[in-house]
Amino acid sequence: MLKFDYLSNLYKFIRVDANMNKGPIRIFYADDDLDDHYLFETALLNSVVPYKLTAFTSGLSLEKELIENNYNCDLVFLDINMPGKDGLAVLETLQPTLKKNLVRVIVFSTSNDPRIIKKTFELKASLFVQKPNSFKELQITVQTILERMTSSTADFENFNFKCDNVN
């Protein structure tokens, strides 16, 4: 089972580029589940960090928007399990951009499969977060990530996850 302590661990993970502190954080959110869209957007409403959200219902539409707009976003929340082009395939396509650290991708998924988690990091995702079980945890998670995006001390490189009883 994957264990992730949202409150104590999220504060360590996001690395910031100097240009991220100019204006609202530009967020792209890709998930095929419209209920998850609603919950994510609602969790953002109380954010003290300025943001601009653009939502997508498929990996293909996200990828198209990123390419057409020269990767003009700061942060992508990316679901893994989507029809058509899933999150892992999108990460594959984004490899040249991710290697240059032009976009930060947070995989935001219900999956807790250690092989998938490992693969997301191999594909240069900045962070893997298993979708929280409650709306309150979702609010805390999203708010913490946004706050760290504006912090000069944030760092994803210390991130690790702990798997117990995985064979």
Image (cartoon, rainbow, N blue to C red):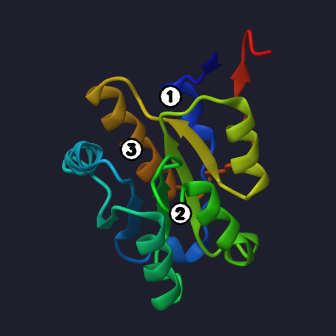
SS of the residue at dot 3? Answer: helix
Earlier along the polypeptide chain: callout 2 or callout 1?
Answer: 1
Residue 37 at what x, y percent from top left? 27, 50
Q: Name which residue type carries label 2.
A: Lys
Q: In which quarter of the image is the N terminus?
A: top right
Residue 96 at what x, y percent from top left? 74, 77
Q: In which quarter of the image is the C terminus?
A: top right
What residue is pinned by disc 3? Answer: 142
Residue most toward the front? 84
Q: Where is 106 relative to 71, above or below? A: above
Relative side of 81 to 94, left or right = left
The total number of labels drawn is 3
Q: Which mark is residue 123?
A: none
Earlier along the polypeptide chain: callout 1 or callout 3?
Answer: 1
SS of the residue at dot 2? Answer: loop
Residue at figure coordinates x 58%, y 70% from the top left: 103
What residue is pinned by disc 1? Answer: 6
Compare residues 162 and 113 and report the one nearer the observer.
113
Earlier along the polypeptide chain: callout 2 or callout 3?
Answer: 2
State whether residue 137 appears in this view.
Answer: yes
Q: Name which residue type carries label 3.
A: Val
Q: Where is 152 relative to 114, above or below? A: below
What residue is pinned by disc 2? Answer: 85
Q: Count neighbours of disc 1 (C-alpha within 10 A) and say few if under 14, some if 14 to 19, many if 20 or more.
A: some
Compute the Cα span from label 2 to label 1: 28 Å
Residue at figure coordinates x 44%, y 34% from the top left: 131
Residue at figure coordinates x 49%, y 40% from the top left: 109
Relative side of 20 to 121, left or right = left
Residue 43 at what x, y percent from top left? 25, 43
Mark 1 and mark 3 in contact? Answer it, CB < 8 Å. no
Compute the Cα span from label 2 to label 3: 24 Å
Relative side of 93 to 25, left or right = right
